[in-house]
Image (spheres, rainbow, N blue to C red):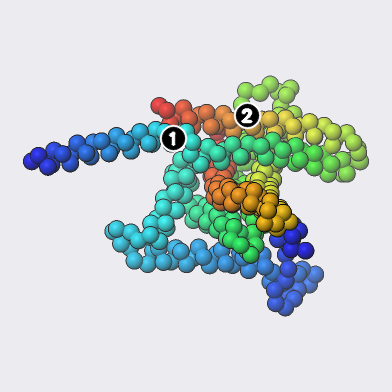
Amino acid sequence: MKQIKEVSTRLEIAKKKIADNHKINKGSNAASLGKALKIGTELVASVVVGTLLGFILDGWFDTRPWLTISFFFMGVGAGILNVIRSAKNMNKKKDMENN
Amino acid sequence: MSTNPMHQFEVYRIGPEISLGSVNLSFTNASLFMLISAATILLLLFLGTKKKLLVPTKIQLITEMSYSFVAKMINDTAGSKAKPFFPFIFTLFMFVLFCNMIGMLPYSFTVTSHIIVTFILAAIVFIGVTIIGFIQHGIKYLELFVPKGVPVLLLPLIVVIEIISYLSRPVSLSVRLFANMMAGHTMLKVFGGFVISLGLLGGWLPLGFSVALTGLEILVAFLQAYVFAILTCIYLNDALNLHH
């Protein structure tokens, strides 16, 4: 009987240790590093795609610099929008995990 | 020649030249390493699922872990509606992961350090997701480009911005993977070159850097495969559940 009790207390302690470890590791897992790496390219890609689209459309309509310039700025806007959106998504997920 | 850090990215032909019309279809070192990655995955999954033990062996454990890792990722990001797409995302994740990891072996070739490979993978995802979106929602899928609560005056501008943002997905997806792999491998090679040129006296410092960078590169190889797969899930989620 005594042995069983001893085992059960040791089990409790081990469980608590695992829970504590889990708490510590929660913020610094690989997933959050992945998210950090992802945001930078998101900003750049939209600018590149926007400018390229403007350049192609300029060729079609024969309006050389104008569409390239305006699509460049719209690309910048799209890039900022993308970054804000993914940041918002992260916050939403974090709130869900906390609740 | 071998100290040139970009030399490792050279694609060359193995065996005879095969051409179909004007298209060059020769077997290259890139194709070889893609085949090696695919074969390694098949071998791992075959060995892992051969003997279904209750207490798993190491290989079975790796197989089961990769399965549940991807299953959980899909469930968390795209919901239960995305279950039918599990095989595709699992294949994509494993392929990118193994291409990255096999690229870390000395004398090997990193397939994912070529933009054309990653861009084709991203384009498959992009076109597939767009088709799925149109199948699921019909013409209403275009509502993705028209956010709610925007004044009519601003609508043309916002729609163009949304379209640019949608079109930038495959670019950001492919450039991220390609740039990370290529930059990492170039850096490793540059530090390796320093070890040789500084010799026995000063070569120890870059050697230490090289060792540390190898660890970092293995982390990046895993992370980029993970990011590639999770972004596919997120795009799939947009296509399946149309509200944002």
N-term mark: 2 or 1: 1
Which element is circle 1 on? helix
Q: Is residue B192 left or right of residue A70?
A: left
Q: Quadrant of residue B23?
A: bottom right
Tell me the quarter of the image containing the C terminus of chain B: top right
Which element is circle 2 on? helix
- Residue with the mark numbered 1: A26
**Gap between marks 2 and 1 measured at Cα:** 24 Å
- Residue with the mark numbered 2: A84
Q: Residue A11 in the image: x percent, y percent?
A: 23, 39
A76 or A67: which is nearer to us? A76
Tell me the quarter of the image containing the N terminus of chain B: bottom right
Q: Quadrant of residue B107?
A: bottom right
Please, what is the three-letter code of the amino acid marked with disc 2?
A: Ile
A42 or B36: which is nearer to us? B36
Please, what is the three-letter code of the amino acid marked with disc 1?
A: Lys
Q: Is residue B187 left or right of residue A52?
A: left
- At horizontal 46% and vertical 40% (from top left) the residue drawn is B76
